[in-house]
Each structure stands twice: as C-alpha cells, then as structure tokens.
C-alpha cells in the first residue's frame, strides 16, 4: 500500500495541510487545476498596477505562525508584515465618517462622541468583553480540532461541569449577531460597523448565531495586518516552505474523481486520466462539490442527508488602476448601505443584488506605494451579491450594476471623479468566481453561517462518510476567512496524521483523536 497523500487544491487550506503533513514526515503530492497555487489569493498585474485578487485583510496571524513553526520556520523571517491602525474607515450615507480602532478605550471614546448620551462607549466595552469570552470558548471547544456538530465540541458525559455549563450559556444560542450587537450598541451606525465582522464569513448578521461575535475580539486583540507584497505573499511563503519540505506540487492538474474501495480512499484520478494511488486525501475543494463531483454514490447521499448547506454570498470585484489616489481613504474602507436590513434581505432572502449595497474598498498604495505607478492607486472594490442562481446572467447584469456601485462610491465615499482617474479596469463576477475557483455557486466564503443554533458548524475536517478523506478550506470547519481557512488545513493535516499513526495491521485507518 502506498504511503503517498494527495492534497486536492492548492488554496490556502491545501497549502497549510501540505506543509503540516510534510513537516510531520508524510510524502505529499499537491494537485492544483490552475497554473498557480494560492486559490483566491491570486494576483493581477497590468500597466504597473498590482492587485490582490481575493482576500485583502489578514487577521489572527498566530494561525499562520503555528503552521510555519511546524516546519521549523519563523513567520517574521518568512514574511514582512505591517500592522494597520486604524483598522478600517467607515463611510455612512448620512455623511458620518468613523474609524475603527483596535484600542478599545479609543473606540469607546469615539463612539461616545458619535452618539452622545447613549452610553455607546460603555456598551462597546461590554460587547468586547462578551466577544473575548466567546473567543475563549471557541479556542477551547471549537478551534484546532475536527468539528461538525455539538457532539464534537463537548463530551456530554465527562465535560458538563459547572464551568462548561456556564460556557454553553455564554454562547447565547438562539440569538443572532445583529440582535446581540444592538443589545450593546444601539446606535445604528456603530451597529452597522460591527455587523460587518460577519462579512468575513459571507453571511447575514440577522441570520448568523451570536457566537460569531467572537470575531470582533479576534480582530481587536490580534490586529489587522498587511503582508508586504500583498496577501499573495502568504501562499507564496507557504509554497516556498512546502517545496523545501519535499512536497510535490503539480499545477495545471485537475482532479476528476476520488477512487473509493471498501469505503476507503485508494486513489486520485486526474483530469488527464492518470491514476495516483494514495493512502489518504485532503480536499481543499468546496466540501459539497467534493462529495458531489469527486466522491458521488452512497457517501455523497449520506453527506447530503445529514444536513443541507447553503452557499455563502458571492460578489463582484472591481480592480481599478487609478492615476491618482484618494487621500481621504485608509488602507481598508467600508462604504455602508443606507439600510442594512434591506441590503441583507435582498442578498440573502430575495437572492438578488442589493439596490443600495455596502462596498468594501482596499487602497493599499498608502501602505505599499509600489502597487501602483507613482502617485497612483491599485483600488480594489468588493460588493457582496447573492450566490449564483440559474436566472443570473452577469454578462447582462454587470453594466447596470457597475453604474449603481460607482454612483454609490461617488455619493457616499466622495470618489466623485472616479471614472476620470481609471487607467486599468478589470472585474470578477460571481460566474467568474464559480468557474475559476471550484466553489459552490460562486460563493466566495464557502457555506453560509446561517441558523441561530447550528449556523457556526460546517462539514468536519475528518469525513464521516469516506475513510481517508479529509476536508479543508472555507467550506469546511472552522469556516471562511484567511485565518480560519489556514486553520482548516492544519486541522485536516493533524487529523490525518493522528489517524495514520493509529493505523491497524490491516491497513485501515484508526481514528485516535
């Protein structure tokens, strides 16, 4: 029996899994259908402008540090990173401009100035204390291990002591992110700013469980970082380390199916028809598509019956090379909708682009001037949209939506002469995202985190349906966003490694976690 492990997909989760597995002595082959590794963390260069095509915000860098330490590498030597403060600038439809600071005291004072007499600052302090508690609970019960449901987080026979019961109550199960935030910070502008932590997971704060409020403390505590060279520098560093460890990386090699015999993965078949015998496989492809397209049969049916998963939102991304930057922008900016309930209703319930959307802007030239010609800007504009429906034809829809988005940027963020400054323009639509990245219905963030009780749970990293199959990426536990996707790769690799070390004489994997 072979000792080779296949990693299917070279996104951040796949690269993290490959590094950890190779660092622990396994023979790893990584198969990537595109000509590059890094998945959505790709780069676009034209006319002296350089754009990060996918994620632009790096938080919780200690996850990446832990992965690199597995390989004996130091994050500070592999990557140069800049901590950004303020973290975001927020533009509101009423003309308010509000900066999000990582310093809780500074932010509380700013909120008191924004909403005098409402005790907004004290409410924000209480919100952050609650967020810190939720973050601690997540670290103890949810992170760094394969989790698919409540049974994976708690040993109900041994763990239900007074302390654990207190933690369970603190999860505020049955409450939403939006309701929890407004219970602490009633000012509509401040609440809308805090709502958007859930946009890291591509979900509506009105449908997501309150435990996701933990993201606020994770960002406040660990900071927002920019890797010099852009977020593309993260997969580049992981690729360098993986190659040093002996990982075989094969780009331009898609996977057609996983061969399963006796309920166990035994081989990977490439698009070109090559059969690669393996002892196990980590799929960094979308988890739903992994079962539907690579596995099929009874395992896919069992997976589908256990729980129905909804794709997270998609988006339209504009890459705009400007001959002059805008001095009033920060590195990260949010241009908020006039009515968040209306916006999220259109995107998540009606399944149509919002008529007045929130726009995220990255303007990285103020941190790294080399992303654009002198005095220019490599502007990145992301607008969340519904995941793809059969009725959506983005070739037809895009021109009108471009006008709507640009009007929003001019009206609310002061980019009044935007089109006069554009020298390079490219766009990525939900259809492009679906076709380019093997995601489900163009969903940028994998699976939605909706549901007041089970919304935080994604498919576990250790498959319950196929022995020797492990899942990584934004559509697997613990979910989307750069740190969580990286963590998913670590968990998949750690679970596989533990199982391999528990292998019996018959060659079958024995879970020892």
Image (cartoon, rainbow, N blue to C red):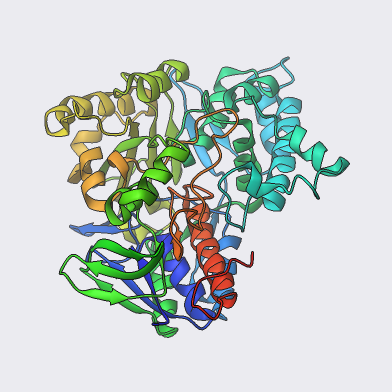
**Quadrant of image for the N terminus:** bottom left
Judge whether residue 484 can be spotted in this image: yes
Q: How many marks?
A: 0
Residue 180, percent from left and from top: 65, 25
Answer above or below: position of 363 versus 472: above
Answer above or below: position of 453 versus 352: below
**Quadrant of image for the C terminus:** bottom right
In the image, taking residue 344 as reference, residue 73 lies left or right, namely right
Residue 192, percent from left and from top: 53, 25
Residue 147, percent from left and from top: 58, 50
User: Residue at horizontal 26%, vertical 29%?
Assistant: 406
In the image, taking residue 388 as reference, residue 199 lies left or right, namely right
Quadrant in which residue 389 is drawn: top left
Q: Nearer the viewer, residue 307 or 447?
A: 307
Answer above or below: position of 274 versus 339: below
User: Residue at horizontal 39%, vertical 28%?
Assistant: 358
**Farthest left residue?**
396
User: Residue at horizontal 58%, vertical 24%?
Assistant: 178
Residue 474, percent from left and from top: 44, 49
User: Residue at horizontal 33%, vertical 34%?
Assistant: 383
In the image, taking residue 431 as reference, residue 229 lies left or right, namely right
Answer above or below: position of 385 versus 59: above
Quadrant in which residue 146 is drawn: bottom right
Q: Nearer the viewer, residue 138 or 358?
A: 138
Judge whether residue 75 can be spotted in this image: no
Q: Nearer the viewer, residue 393 or 370?
A: 393
């Amino acid at each position: 029996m072979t000792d080779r492990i296949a990693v299917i997909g070279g996104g951040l989760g796949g690269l993290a899994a490959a590094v950890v597995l190779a660092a622990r002595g396994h023979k790893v082959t990584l198969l990537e259908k595109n000509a590059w590794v890094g998945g959505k963390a790709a780069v676009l260069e034209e006319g002296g402008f350089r754009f990060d095509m996918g994620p632009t915000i790096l938080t919780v860098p200690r996850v990446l540090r832990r992965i690199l330490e597995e390989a004996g590498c130091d994050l500070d030597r592999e990557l140069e990173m800049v901590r950004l403060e303020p973290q975001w600038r927020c533009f509101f439809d009423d003309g308010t401009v509000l900066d999000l600071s990582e310093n809780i005291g500074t932010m509380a004072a700013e909120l008191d100035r924004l909403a005098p007499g409402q005790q907004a600052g004290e409410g924000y302090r209480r919100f952050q204390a609650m967020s810190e508690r939720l973050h601690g609970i997540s670290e103890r019960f949810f992170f760094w291990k394969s989790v698919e449901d409540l049974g994976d987080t708690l040993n109900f026979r041994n763990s239900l002591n007074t302390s654990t019961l207190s933690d369970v109550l603190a999860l505020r199960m049955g409450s939403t992110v939006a309701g929890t935030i407004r219970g602490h910070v009633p000012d509509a502008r401040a609440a809308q700013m805090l709502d958007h932590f859930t946009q890291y997971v591509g979900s509506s704060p009105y449908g997501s469980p309150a435990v996701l409020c933990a993201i606020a403390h994770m960002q406040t505590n660990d900071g927002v970082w920019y890797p010099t060279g852009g977020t593309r520098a993260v997969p580049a560093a992981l690729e360098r380390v993986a190659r040093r460890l002996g990982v075989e990386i094969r780009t331009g090699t898609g996977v057609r199916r996983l061969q399963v015999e006796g309920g166990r993965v035994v081989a990977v078949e490439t698009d070109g028809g090559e059969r690669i015998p393996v002892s196990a496989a980590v799929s960094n492809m979308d988890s739903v598509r992994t079962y539907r397209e690579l596995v099929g049969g009874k395992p896919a049916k069992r997976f589908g019956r256990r729980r129905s998963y909804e794709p997270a939102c998609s988006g339209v991304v504009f890459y705009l090379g400007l001959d002059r930057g805008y001095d009033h922008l920060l590195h990260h900016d949010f241009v908020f909708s006039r009515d968040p309930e209306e916006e999220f209703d259109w995107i998540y319930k009606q399944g149509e682009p919002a008529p007045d959307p929130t726009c995220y802007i990255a303007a990285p030239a103020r941190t790294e001037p080399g992303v654009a010609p002198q005095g220019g800007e490599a502007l990145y504009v992301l607008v969340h949209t519904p995941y793809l429906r059969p009725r959506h034809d983005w070739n037809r829809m895009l021109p009108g939506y471009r006008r709507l988005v640009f009007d929003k940027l001019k009206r609310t963020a002061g980019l009044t002469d935007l089109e006069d400054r554009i020298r390079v323009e490219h766009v990525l639509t939900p259809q492009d995202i679906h076709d380019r990245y093997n995601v489900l219905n163009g969903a940028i963030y994998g699976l939605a985190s909706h549901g007041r009780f089970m919304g935080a749970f994604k498919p576990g990293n250790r498959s319950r349906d196929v022995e020797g199959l492990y899942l990584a990426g934004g559509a697997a536990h613990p979910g989307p966003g750069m740190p969580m996707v990286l963590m998913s790769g670590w968990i998949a690799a750690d679970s596989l490694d533990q199982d391999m070390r528990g292998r019996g004489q018959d060659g079958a994997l024995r879970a020892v976690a």
